[in-house]
Image (spheres, rainbow, N blue to C red):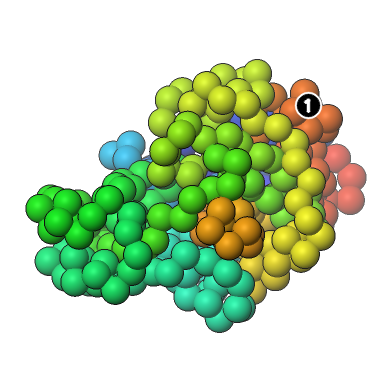
Amino acid sequence: MLPIGILYEHPQWFTPLFAELDRRGLPYEKLDATRLVFDPDDREPSHSLVVNRMSPSAWMRGHGHAIFHTLHYLTYVDGIGTPVLNGLRAYELELSKARQASLLAELGIPHPRTRVVADRTAVAAAASELDFPVLVKPNVGGSGAGITAFQSLAELTEASLDPGLDGTLLVQEQLPAAGDAIVRVEILDGEYLYAIRILLLPGSFNLCPADYCELPGVADGVSGRGLPIEAYEPPAEVIEDAKRIVRAGGLDLGGVEYLVNERIGEPTFYDVNALSNFVADATNVLGFDPFVSLVDLIELRAGALSPATGVLA
């Protein structure tokens, strides 16, 4: 069989993925998105499956060019008929918080009131229509990047704002999280995989749940904030909403995040992530390794009915 292509940017996040592919003896090729070259005239697929693990936060590591190159590459492989796990549609949603807000609105799923702004000078006027405090976010984010909180219109008016990679900003009401906690629900191939509950520092506005947010995470069930991460079972209706979001967004796998809005006691979704590198120390936190489940899906989609040899890494 043709090798599986693993498209990625971060050099360490997917070590467990490569290890599981190695353990099974599956042929794969590491596709570094920062250095990727392809020939548009080559119309024969080179991979049995491309697994898109490209991060929108690549611009924070000096790899913003790889974000746009990935869009070109996914368009190309789609055009020649290569199956893709989290393909172009999922990636476009991953790259745009504006699209995510529109998707949640389309589905009728509770989410923070939001304004999408093309010019940073219009942010204050847009925010005046919302209840403070508000968050200002770059449209292309990742790992909680670039989020700033403002307690008043006067404070926001005086601020110098970074419009981010595509020049688009979102202004969003900052909702109080009941119990100072957020939840991330992971969906794989349309089914619930697991959820984790993360405690926030009091007054924290960066709701990124990943182990590497704010401070380097450690693999002991504690987030980069130094606060616990725990396995959590959301209400059935919340899991169903998470499935709806992932399905409507065209994601084969991904995490959606919500908090319980303390003002009304209602679960409120605020982020959609096509990229998930899963929780650190998953075996102890969850009781199983989600990368095994992911590679089960990769093997199925690649058509690998029996292990092959010769890892192309």
Q: Is residue 243 visible?
A: no
- Name above or below for residue 163 compared with residue 30: below
- Specify the amino acid type for callout 1: Thr
Image quadrant holding the C terminus, namely top right
- Spot occupied by residue 234 in the image (x, y as percentages of width and height): 76, 51
- Spot occupied by residue 137 in the image (x, y as percentages of width and height): 33, 55
Q: Where is residue 121, by image quadrant?
A: bottom left
- Spot occupied by residue 266 in the image (x, y as percentages of width and height): 63, 62
- Residue at point 63% right, 46% down? 183
Q: Is residue 216 left or right of residue 230?
A: left
Q: Residue furthest right?
A: 306
Q: Nearer the viewer, residue 76 or 134?
A: 134
For disc 1, the marked residue is 283
Q: Where is residue 306, by image quadrant?
A: top right
Q: Residue furthest bottom?
A: 106
Marker count (numbered):
1
- Spot occupied by residue 46 in the image (x, y as percentages of width and height): 60, 56
Q: Is residue 304 visible?
A: yes
Mark 1 secondary-structure assignment: helix
Q: Is residue 145 left or right of residue 123?
A: right
- Residue at point 61% right, 54% down? 260
Q: Nearer the viewer, residue 220 or 189?
A: 220
